[in-house]
Image (tube, helix red, strand yellow):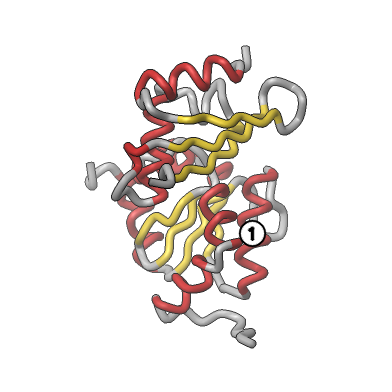
Amino acid sequence: MPMSSADIERLIKIKFPDASVQLTDLAGDNDHWAAHVVTSAFKGKSRVQQHQMVYDALGGRMGGVLHALQLTTALPAD
Amino acid sequence: MAEDPVQATIAKTIADNDVVLFMKGTRQFPQCGFSATAVKILDHLGVPFKDVNVLDDMGVRDGIKNYSNWPTIPQLYVKGEFVGGCDIMREMYQAGELHDLICEKGIPHAHHHG
């Protein structure tokens, strides 16, 4: 059962309460999402670490039930 | 962890090659859109790389995810360092960062400055 955008956003916000999560449905099939995540928690982290943080927030579903999440990350403009 | 033969083979492949792309399929015949995008990016940069088809060996397919603590394929390694998957490669490529990384690491590639 593919993950809904609400699930993705909720999981990320549980881990990063200040996160803003922009989700775009790439294929209109509720299974190919692009997510842009912005949170201060990324400060000082490399891109790889930032993505790993998001994957951890998604509780290991990435690569499993969620196989196509196009992810970009950024720090909030302070 | 290192005595695990799969992890040892993975580590050796990464150490023996400047640029390694663990992917689904091969350079000529990528079997997945993300892997195909990764190959295209490296070809655009004119970077020679070792392609490892994880579909040939389920051990490597799972082992590589533990090796880098990264859940998906493809995975790019430059001079022994995990660079990222398809998303990060695309983002870095578009920002010119992938080209800079390869230049910095002294890896031969198609030079087309200017």
Q: Residue furthest bottom?
A: B114
Q: Residues within 10 Å of mark 1 (few under 14, many from 20)?
A: many
Q: What subunit carries mark 1?
A: B
Please identify the residue farthest to the top as the structure is shown: A1
Measuring from the top left, give residue B52's x and y in whole percent: 53, 54
Residue A17 location in percent, x, y?
A: 37, 23
Question: What residue do we see at 69% from left, 20% from top?
Answer: A30
What residue lies at 56% left-to-right and 47% top-to-bottom? B87
Whether residue B68 is situated above or below residue B71 in the rendered picture: below
Question: In the picture shown, does residue A70 fall above or below B40?
Answer: above
Q: Left or right: B7 with respect to A9?
A: left
The quadrant in which the N terminus of chain A is found is top right
Q: Position of residue B70 (x, y in %)?
A: 41, 40
Q: Amino acid at mark 1?
A: Val
Q: Nearer the viewer, residue B79 or B60?
A: B79
Residue shown at 72% from the left, 33% from the top: A26
User: How many marks do you count on the picture?
Assistant: 1
Residue B6 showing in the rendered view: no
Query: Position of B110 compared to A8: left or right?
Result: right
Which residue does the image show at 48% across and 43% down from the upper left? A73
Is residue B7 visible in the rendered structure shown here?
yes
Q: Nearer the viewer, residue B62 or B59?
A: B62
Which is more toward the observer, B87 or A11? Answer: A11
Residue B7 location (% of width, % of height): 32, 46
Q: Residue furthest right?
A: A28
Q: Which residue is mark 1?
A: B39
SS for dot 1: helix
